[in-house]
Image (cartoon, helix red, strand yellow):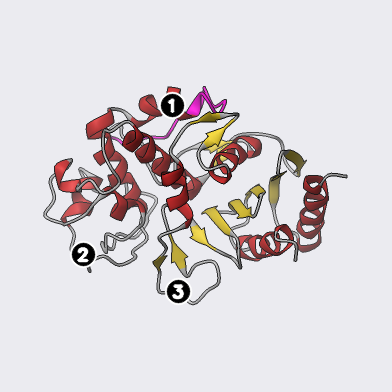
Amino acid sequence: MTRAEDLRDTIAARIDETGFVAHGLHVRVGADSATRRWAPDEREEIHSVAKAVAVLAAGIAADEGLVTLDTPVSDLLPTMHDLTLRHLLTMTSGIDFPYSETMMTDWPDLAAEFLSRPSRGRVFQYSNASTYTAMHALAQRVGDIETYLRPRLFAPLGLTDVSWRRCPHGRVLGGEGISLRTDEMARLGVLIRDRGIFDGRRLVSAETVDAMHSGWVPTGSDTDGYRRYALAGWDGPGDAGRLHGAHGQLIVFAGDAVVTVTADDHGGADALSAFIATRASGG
């Protein structure tokens, strides 16, 4: 039995024991992989895991010299705030903009509304509108984000027919709006684990990927796994790191292990990610 199979069986047993509503599990350890399913193998919304795709888009554009992560937003969109793309993607705009299911249609222009609101300075303030605004800003240099990413990221990952949901203005949602199968989401995890290389091809600089689990920003939370945030990534639980989407969409990184979960269990995701972190780290 490979390490990936052993870890898969351990996590699957925990899922069955706790009743966590998993749909799929993909485990990659080194070059070995193993899977388990509890529901049909269909594409599902990955929610905030899409924020990592937004970061990769900005990183690829930086590699091509079109922007840097420290490009002022005011160079791209009208705003009085002293913000950069990095601030928007690390949730340090300090702009409070709570999520709602109608946020894309509540204002004539969500990005303009977001940038018009007051800021508390360079402090953590989580908001889907921040990533959405970052992608709208990036589009001023690269054109349509999905079109830009198709040959640079989606096709190399084997995601040629993936689309990104859009707002009424036709802009990608940024912080959500991508549907993937479990193994497809796992490819994002492998790309990140391997510092921007997938299937022997570099898709994005190691510098961008490294910034997804370094340069941590304190969030003000005392909860393990939520104390620090970077470019789309959370520090923890424990010694692990993760991408975490609503309703239990997880990519957990621990050493050379990448554990990907698709689910419909928002309340149980933190406990499962803690279990994965412990077992994947050898605990």
Query: Distance of mark 1 from mark 3, alpha carbons?
Result: 36 Å
Element type at marker 2? loop
Q: Which residue is mark 2?
A: 119
Point out residue 20 in the picture as x, y percentages from the top left corner: 71, 58
Q: Residue furthest bottom?
A: 222
Query: Distance of mark 3 from mark 2, alpha carbons?
Result: 19 Å
Q: Going from the N terminus, do you reach mark 1 or mark 2 first? A: 2
Q: Which mark is residue 199?
A: none
**Of the residues shown, which amino acid type is indicated by label 3?**
Ser
Residue span colored magenta: 154-168
* Residue 267 to residue 77: above or below: below
Q: Is residue 203 visible?
A: yes
Asked if the stretch drawn in magenta spans residue 158, the answer is yes
User: Would you call the spot at circle 1 few (<14 residues within 10 Å), some (14-19), or many (20 or more)?
Assistant: some
Point out residue 258 in the picture as x, y percentages from the top left corner: 65, 48
**Of the residues shown, which amino acid type is indicated by label 1?**
Arg
